[in-house]
Image (cartoon, rainbow, N blue to C red):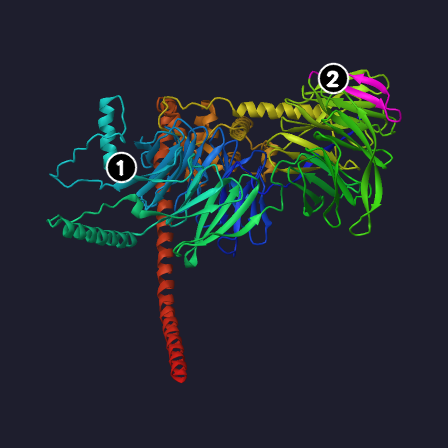
Amino acid sequence: MGLTKQYLRYVASAVFGVIGSQKANISYVTLRGGEKGRYVAVAACEHVFIWDIRKAEKVLILQGQKHEVTFLCPSPDGVHIAVGYEDGAVRIFSLLNGESNVSFNGHKTAVTVIHYDALGARLVTGSKDTDVIVWDVINECGLYRLRGHKDIITQALFLKDKNLLVTSSKDSFVKWWDLDTQHCFKTIVGHRSEVWGMVLLNQENRLLTGSADSELRAWDISYLQEEKSEGEPKVKKGKTLLDDDDDDGEENEVDESSEERILSCKKAGSILREARDRVVSLTTDRKARIIACHGNDSVLEVFTVLSEEEVQKKMTKKLKKAKKKAAKAQDDAGEQTEDPVVERTLKDEIIRLTNIKASAKIRWVECLSCVGGELKVALLLQNNTIETYSLKTSDKTPTANKTARLTLGGHRTDVRTLAFSSDNLAVLSASGDTVKVWNRSTLQVIRTMACEYALSSLFVPGDRQIILGTKSGTLQIFELASGNLLETVDAHSGALWSLCLAPDQRGIVTGSADKTVKFWEFELIKDQGTGQKRLTVKHMRTLQLEEDVLCVKFSPDHRLLAVSLLDCTVKVFYTDTLKFFLSLYGHKLPVLCLDISHDNTIIATGSADRNVKIWGLDFGDCHRSMFAHDDSVMFLQFVPKTHLFFTAGKDKKIKQWDADKFEHIQTLEGHHREVWCLAISPNGDHLVSSSHDKSLRLWERTREPIILEEEREMEREAEFEESMAKGDVPVVPGETQGEAAPAGKKTVETVKAAERIMEALELYKGEARKMEEHKYACERAGKELPPPKPNPILVAFGNVSPSRYVLDVIKKVRSSELEVSLLVLPFSYIPELLTLFNSFIQQGLEVELVCRCLFFLLKIHFGQISSNQMMLSVIDDLRTNTQSKVREIRDMMGFNSAALQFLQREIESKEDVMFFTDATGQLQEKKKKRRKRERAILTLA
């Protein structure tokens, strides 16, 4: 059967109009050869945009797949950036080419925090699922999962010199983890509410935490020596509120001694913020000398941490003052008083530097210290804006100067109306304060004009002017060439919900909440100011109705006018006499959008009751009612010259339908919030949609046909894959749930990888059986028979041996998914796999990978392997072979490492000589300059 009706697929073409999403943070990055503090990375829905602040342009887009970005963290060397997503995945991108080769899957829900260690070799991630996972970036695999928090993780920091990790959470606890034993050895319980932010100061000897009140609490950390010298008495520790209060006495003792062995933490005081609400973000610069924090408002508070010398100077001054005061008091009283004592408080060490007032509420802050005591601050604001400030920290009263503000590439508020120009080239988008015109092919802004709160819009025929309908009921007419507002017409006394161009292109019709529909005609009048002709609209007729008007549409033949009312009906009138023709009733909630097909035969209506109804325009009969979206249908429009139409819903989806066959053709998924409106280009090749996530998306029609059965099949497969990934975590026999657990999680990829390994082992078994049969046949025949044909898969891979093919399949499994894939393998395959591993190790093939798989399998199947007599010989062989091979590799690495160090010393010794010659040259230069200066002074004198 051939295709009865061909539909063409629409695909996502671009995301624009978004400067920085609210879901994630902002971060300074350095691009190759670029200066510090010039580029910032921000999330833009599922992508990451790198902006050049000075030029206010996008320099790099890190492409995401489907889920929103929730956290960004650049690596210490500045070459990579780790990106966390809404579904719990973490991907590491290269900032040199924007590609991502490493991805980690371990969390079940959104990643809330990511941090690298000082070397950039490990990565810690925290999530809404309350787990903390430590990843090995070099080996591209998960190390372990740390469980203990009971709510969203808000911060996780590695310590530089010690193998410790400190994490904070909304459960009001700060936990210290010993990463050698993967054990939480201390919990700080001194917070009364959620801990929202945390930084380490003073060479990691102080912890500063921000919670839901206006206090920033400081904790002094003292690291204790591992061992006590002999005979030294143990210090008896008094119990305080800040220590763990476990019900179990024995456990308490153990806990106390273990935490005593590593570090002790006591409250050092607190700093008061000016803001009264919770800390939204708390951050420091790289050297932890500047602290910046803010709440849910537009004020950023900046503090400076004084160095030990500065604090001492301050304390000496204070003491002098106190002594003077005491001496004066002594003189007055005439008695001997003892020397005054000045206590050192937190306020002496951390001083408020300044406040920075941003233009809107702040979502996130990032600081960067530059040369010459300059501090650069980047703010991501809640209204789709990035601002950067610079201040001199060395000044007595530093003031912040705004250095850049990125606003051009997007609207401050949601776009509520869109329109295409008649030549398909320009797109109009209007929001609560501005209207922008974009070039569709380059996605650059051509014009930005201030307007009132826009609800509806259109291009005037000729595309030289645009008309907006606003919330206050006015019509605003703009000229595109100059960007001027030509006229504001007081059209209605209520919100102007809908505009429609007349089919003869001579006028427009407007529908408003003031229960009227008004007809207008275009007119050219002489402008009094300039004397030139300009466009205006002249009111011709008014249609008075009983209910608020939500939407108006002319039929393309200009015969009928459809009006949707607040009483859930659609009334159809004759255009010429305004006589009533039809009433379309059946929706349970108001009709928010409607459209009439190009041949005037059908009208489609979309309602807040989530249904779309298709009616005949001859008799007003309802052809079909379809459940369209999971929330209100916000917008509906026919594709020009067809009976296909698109709907947009509050359920974040855009759907295409066939009005003749009443079929759902395709769903365009991409927006992360409610979709407000869409516009289809006059030729039907492009579609633009706008959403509450501040993004505008462009979709384009391809030449690829859609076969509906296949489309439904793909949807079912995607659903199945999602449900499979949400299945139970495979259990390791004999293991109980503890604080530490494996880092990986079962995903579609891991299940597929396990299936590929099983298929390879089955193929290996089949080939081995074939070879056995061939050998037996040769023996029986008493001569060498032709060998059996190898499996076509092996031939396709270049005639590899079956065992080598198994190794290749294992090698192709992603490093981060290897353990979980092996965990899913049934035990019946394990004996075969261990025998193969033995041969691989003997041949010296991929020893590291094979050892990693071997040790994991031994760990999880220990009971079954050790109780199996057949496998003892294999395990014994493995033991001897593995040890000797690993020793060989270790020796080779040691030799190479020593050789590299030798080369390094050689180069350094050569360079040292160079440095000295360089230095003498510089000294002579300086002397020359000094002589010149002295001469100049003498001549002046």
Query: Which quadrant is home to the N terminus?
Result: top right
Residue at image coords 30%, 47%: 348
Q: Give me the C-alpha separation between circle 1 and circle 2.
A: 67 Å
- The image shows residue 689, relative to residue 870, as above or below, that is below
- The image shows residue 576, relative to residue 62, as above or below, that is above
Circles 1, 2 touching at the beta carbon (< 8 Å): no
Residue at image coords 52%, 57%: 33
Q: Position of residue 295 (x, y in %)?
A: 45, 38
Quarter of the rendering containing residue 652: top right
- Label 1 sits on residue: 266
Query: Which quadrant is home to the C terminus?
Result: bottom left
Residue 864 shown left or right of residue 46 in the figure: left
Q: Position of residue 785 (x, y in %)?
A: 58, 32
Looking at the picture, tell me which residue is in the foreground, 880 or 123.
123
- Label 2 sits on residue: 625
Q: Secondary structure at mark 1?
A: strand
Mark 1 surroundings: few (<14), some (14-19) or many (≥20) residues within 10 A: some
- The image shows residue 816, relative to residue 533, as above or below, that is above
Mark 2 surroundings: few (<14), some (14-19) or many (≥20) residues within 10 A: some
Residue at image coords 36%, 56%: 901
Looking at the picture, tell me which residue is in the foreground, 633 or 686.
633
Q: Which residues are magenta?
A: 569-588
